[in-house]
Image: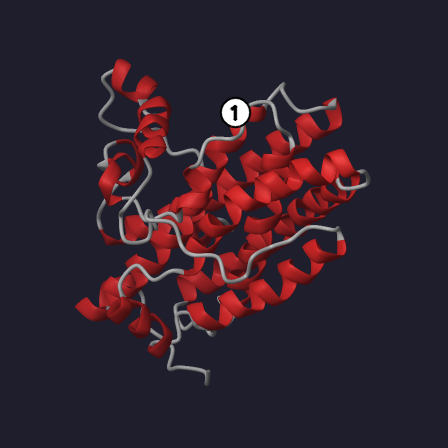
Amino acid sequence: MTTAERLPGPDDLSDEEREAVETLLFRLADDEFVLAERYTEWQVRAPTLESDLALANIAQDELGHARLWYDLLQDFGPDEPDLIWERPADEWRHGTMVELPFEEGDWADPVLRSYLYDVAEEIRLEALVDSSYSRIRDRVGKIQGEEDYHREHAENWLERLTEDETGRERVQRALDRLFPYALTIFEPADEEVEGRIDELGLRTESLADMREAWLDTVVPYLDGLGLDADADADLPDEIGRDKSHTDDWNDLREEFTATYRELDRHEATRIMEDPDEVA
């Protein structure tokens, strides 16, 4: 794609430009937030203390990344409760891989899920480096440095788990389950709006191109570990981007909003400064 004309700040966007920015930001923020919530379920359950701490740190990183994107959505009026704690479950835009519960007690599941997601995250962040919207562009570098560690952690564990036949079988079962849902990361929220995102230069690669780049990376890597990733797998019925979700999503949302509801809160404490306001 050619470099598009730079867009103005949030107060000067047209309605169509604003819709495109919001759609892109919800894709980014919702993925990160929901994945972070799932990762917390593995705290004190990982096979080693080192990996337990690593996954806790990764969850914290993903939550921080989500906050960076939600912060940009607040430019358009909604506050944090509107965006997270009080938003109806059927208004979320994350791909459905991040909402699936983990297979109980199977470390192969979070490790593989992390790998599939982190490769996708690297690709889509690279497509935002020269975004036409400066508020997005200015945040990408803050996230990219942390994502390198996430992928390295996942790859190290995948290589350990697939050293023997029993381990490969465990990872293959996780792959068969997760791979179709991983493809939802690259599905459109709305075809017309996604096209506008590309035309406006909000990202420099289309969803289709990013999907191909992702397949070109993960399929050969997994094949090299003795695993079979079905690049032609059918998409699941629940995509997420189109606001269709699995039954597990309602349960997860009820869980992470429970404290907010029980305390009868109507606002949330801001835990991260706007990077644009930090000297």
User: Can you name the residue that lies furthest to the right here?
Assistant: 163
The amino acid marked with disc number 1 is: Glu
Quadrant of residue 119 in the image?
bottom right
Q: Nearer the viewer, residue 117 or 180?
A: 180
Residue 27 lies, with reference to residue 30, above or below; the image says below
Residue furthest to the left in view is 15
146 sits left or right of 274 in the view = right
* Residue 14 seen in render: no
State the residue at coordinates (45%, 48%): 181
**Place of residue 255 in the rendered image (x, y in percent of width and height, measured from the top left):** 36, 22
Quadrant in the picture for residue 57: top right
Residue 168 is situated, as x and y percent measured from the top left of the image, at 72, 40
Q: Residue at x 25, y 21 (%)?
A: 265
Which residue is labeled 1 in the image? 41
Closer to the camera, 205 or 10?
205
| Residue 105 image point, x, y percent | 60, 23
**Image position of 212 with respect to 28: above or below:** below
Left or right of 223 in this view: 102 = left
Q: Quadrant of residue 18?
A: bottom left
Instruction: Give residue 124's position: percent from left, percent from top.
Output: 51, 62
